[in-house]
Image (spheres, rainbow, N blue to C red):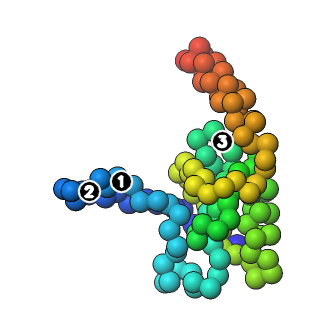
Amino acid sequence: MTAMPLTCSNVSEAAPAQKVSTTVTPFQPLDADILNASIPAFFIGRDKDGFWLARDSKGRAGGLFLLESSALAFARRHAWPSGCATVFSFEVLELDVENQGNPLIDHLRPLMRLANRGLRRMGALRA
């Protein structure tokens, strides 16, 4: 298993006639100098609500999970039997494919946001 920090580069110059995004999507295939193209790579990270995310670099599989171990198991299962490289992101990621992971995430998202809001308020009271 390989762990690497994931970075995004900013676009410095925008074309005058088109709308250009300011960041490059973090789900880019890895450079051939880093990893052979025949080895599948999965990005592992957290979304804005704190759920674990696993997504392959080619956008064929992705899912949201409660636990990091579940995200890793998803990646291993989709890369079976050859295995895969995993790239851990320290940045917030958002799933841009259909959630093939835990189907309860959509129901738990409002509860997680409420809990996070309460924790932030408690932290503000202590400061």
- Tag 1's secondary structure? loop
Give the class, few, some or many, for how many residues have Cα within 10 Å of label 3's Cα (few <14, many ≥20).
some
Position of the N terminus, as image quadrant, is bottom right
Locate residue 127, reporting x and y percent: 55, 18
Foreground residue among 89 and 23: 23
Left or right for 23, reference 112: left
Pointer 2 residue? 18
- How far is mark 3 from mark 1, CA to CA? 24 Å
Pointer 3 residue? 50
Sequence-wise first label, 2 or 3? 2
Q: Residue at x 38, y 60 (%)?
A: 9
What kind of residue is marked 2? Gln
Give the class, few, some or many, for how many residues have Cα within 10 Å of label 2's Cα (few <14, many ≥20).
few
Locate residue 95, reporting x and y percent: 60, 53
Left or right for 58, reference 16: right
Give the class, few, some or many, for how many residues have Cα within 10 Å of label 1's Cα (few <14, many ≥20).
few
Sequence-wise first label, 3 or 1? 1
Q: Residue at x 60, y 66 (%)?
A: 59
What kind of residue is marked 1? Ser
- How far is mark 1 from mark 2, CA to CA? 10 Å
Q: Residue at x 70, y 26 (%)?
A: 115
Foreground residue among 5 and 93: 93
- Tag 2's secondary structure? loop
Q: Mark 3 and mark 1 in contact? Answer it, CB < 8 Å.
A: no
Indicate which disc residue 21 carries.
1
Residue 67 visible in the current orientation: no
Query: Relative to 2, is 110 above or below?
Result: above
